[in-house]
Image: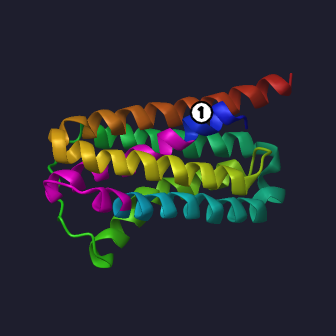
Amino acid sequence: MGIGELFVLAVGLSMDAFAVAICKGLAIGKSSFKSAVIVGLWFGFFQALMPLIGYFVGLQLSDYIKAFDHWVAFVLLAAIGISMIVESRSKKEENESPSLNIRAMFPLAVATSIDALASGIALAAVDGNIYWAVSFIGIITFTLSAIGVRLGSLAGVRYKSKAELAGGIILIAIGAKILIEHLVEGM
């Protein structure tokens, strides 16, 4: 996976965290640099940790799924993408707490990074340095989450659904690209 593809994957995966960070910024009100960094660290860390875990799970299963790993990657990324698109269309209003303590942030960090766990399984199907990939994903998520907190405090929830929609479309496109490349190689 090249740097461009990895960047697109990282941005796609970080869209849930970005959307929640916008809501967190709205709940905080006037956010500080410190609050943006705290939210960014929580989301960035878990967004890096989960694909690493998924990668090692995927490696354990690789002998069993080698013949159809491209389909696994496509289905996982497409399912995550579709879920994000559906969520972006939901009219359900989420009320976010302004708290940045562990009780408030841990569940959010885990919830926004579950899709990254599945992407880690997909990453096991492609060649590349997983440590570089998860570091990159974590840094992109940290940055976008910190920006999200600031945007939320300035602009409100206007961008939440757009961010989730964009993330979903990006993940589906990456899954399709992996599938198409493998099918073309097999010809």
70 relative to 135, above or below: above
Total count of labels: 1
Q: Is residue 108 magenta?
A: no
SS at badge 1: helix
Quarter of the figure with the C terminus: top right
Say whether residue 86 is left or right of residue 180. Answer: left
- Amino acid type of disc 1? Ile
User: What residue is shown at x 57% (from left), y 46% (from top)?
Assistant: 76
User: What residue is shown at x 34% (from left), y 45% (from top)?
Assistant: 147
13 relative to 135, above or below: above
Magenta segment boundaries in residue numbering: 10-37
Question: Who is closer to the viewer here, 157 or 65?
Answer: 157
How many residues crowd around disc 1 within 10 Å: few (fewer than 14), some, or many (20 or more)? many
User: What residue is shown at x 60% (from left), y 35% (from top)?
Assistant: 175
The residue under label 1 is: 174
Across and down, in percent, residue 30 comes to 14, 54
Across and down, in percent, residue 101 comes to 28, 75
Question: Who is closer to the viewer here, 63 or 23?
Answer: 23
The colour mode here is rainbow
Q: Is residue 18 magenta?
A: yes
Quarter of the figure with the N terminus: top right
